[in-house]
Amino acid sequence: MVVSALWAVAMAAFVSMVVAMAAAELQVHFYKDSCPQAELVVKGIMQQRFSSDPSLPAGLLRLHFHDCFVHGCDGSVLIDSSGNNVAEKDAPPNLTLRGFEVIDEIKAELEKQCKGIVSCADILALATRDGVALTGGSAYALPTGRRDGTVSNISDVHIPGPSFSVAEAASAFQTINLSLEDLVTLLGAHAMGFCHCGFFVDRLYNFGGSGQADPDIDPQFLGVLRQKCPRPNNNVPFNLSTDPKIFMTPSSGTPFKLDASFYRGVLQEQATLQLDQGLAFTDLTRRIAADYIGRPNVFRRKFAKAMIKLGNVDVLTGQQGEIRANCRRFNQPNHDLNHFS
Ligand code: HEM
Ligand SMILES: *[C@@H]1O[C@H](CO)[C@@H](O)[C@H](O)[C@H]1NC(C)=O
Ligand SMILES: *[C@@H]1O[C@H](CO)[C@@H](O)[C@H](O)[C@H]1NC(C)=O
Ligand SMILES: *[C@@H]1O[C@H](CO)[C@@H](O)[C@H](O)[C@H]1NC(C)=O
Ligand SMILES: CC(=O)N[C@H]1CO[C@H](CO)[C@@H](O)[C@@H]1O
């Protein structure tokens, strides 16, 4: 009797554990009962904003990557610094992150229609997904159900840098369980958007302190880049907000299309970042790049798969975290008393 009662208790615990584990998974159309129009609202606003700013999807892709890489995809990158908390977005690599306003706009609309239901982390992931489709990528089904995190700390930001080797970037990706192939595939996002000269200007004038350009830049392309990015003046402190910017893949002619042009640039020694150019110089990464150029639909499919994987990194689910009312602030009201806003 006692044994079977214990057994029943153990079974119940086991079952509830399994249920809890199941609840901890993201699922496609998580909001289908709680806010059926959620994905349509996101898509509608994205379409509107995209029609006046075709570069928006690029901004969101980078924002979503930075969100997921630091502390998981929990909307922590969206938090503003306040009081004595210096948030992720104030870390130097975050300079020039953009797309915050459209997330605010979507959040405001969803709070009107479904108060307290749709997380900021999901809004960012969904808006990014819609941006991918709007720029020629595949319109993949995105699992949702992320909750918003309650920590955003500048000390947690360890994003790979533009001068990393492929091996260094791959090992950084390994810390979020993404493979080298995922890295090569997601870097395809560099087909789109902008890059400030400061992230690669060393390659144009003083590569590795040599006083020379990086030898792995196509000479004609070097001339073009030097015209757009003048030699830094050592007497003027570097300032990213006044730094000139170019297209991330300038040779493509399609700066707002998520096509395989990034890989073409890489194989023609016309990549802007040192990391990106590095993909040309290991067998595996070179082979993947050539494959994506030859089979653009394979790139689209693999990109969507890698985005879903990125979007799963360290997510909060179930009762974890919170659903923020404002994507820039944590909900805790007593916390706000200390903040003069
Ligand atoms: C793994 C290492 C990565 C490094 C070192 C890196 C570095 C950079 C740098 C330096 C910029 C230029 C930012 C600016 O000047 O404003 C940039 C832009 C961009 N990155 Fe990455 N990135 C990486 C991975 C990714 C990933 C995984 C994605 C998306 C899946 C991504 C998407 C983008 C996009 C779309 C832009 C253009 C942003 C804009 O137009 O505002 N990057 N990246
Ligand atoms: C941020 O992280 C640092 C280093 O781990 C820690 O000392 C600090 O207390 C954290 N700040 C907040 C507001 O949690
Ligand atoms: C990576 O995978 C390991 C093993 O499955 C897991 O313990 C860890 O939490 C994962 N890390 C992230 C960031 O998802
Ligand atoms: C960078 O330039 C902007 C715009 O001119 C200016 O507002 C800002 O103070 C400068 N920042 C630094 C660190 O000099
Ligand atoms: C968009 C954004 O919030 N950028 C911040 C990045 O970090 C710098 C400080 O390093 C802040 O001044 C910017 O506001």
Image: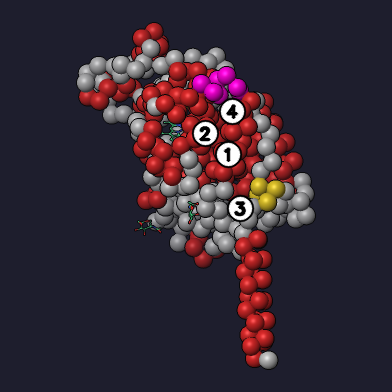
Which residue corresponds to the image point at 38% horizontal and 45% vertical from the top-left?
A: 158
Name the image quarter holding residue 266. top left
Figure colour scheme:
secondary structure
Query: Could you tell me which residue is drawn at 67 percent across and 87 percent down?
Result: 5
Q: Position of residue 172 (x, y in %)?
A: 40, 42
The front one of 99 and 146 is 146
Give the residues drawn in magenta, as a range: 290-296
Q: Position of residue 209 (x, y in %)?
A: 22, 24
Task: Identify the mark at residue 299; answer none if there is no mark.
Answer: 4
Amino acid found under the numbered disc labelled 1: Met
The vertical placement of 184 against 16, above or below, is above
The residue wearing badge 1 is: 307
Image quadrant in which you'd find residue 239:
top left
Tell me the residue that label 2 is attached to.
186
The residue labelled by disc 3 is 146
Vertical placement of residue 47 versus 225, above or below: below
- Image x and y of residue 254, in percent: 57, 17
Q: Nearer the viewer, mark 4 or mark 1?
A: 4
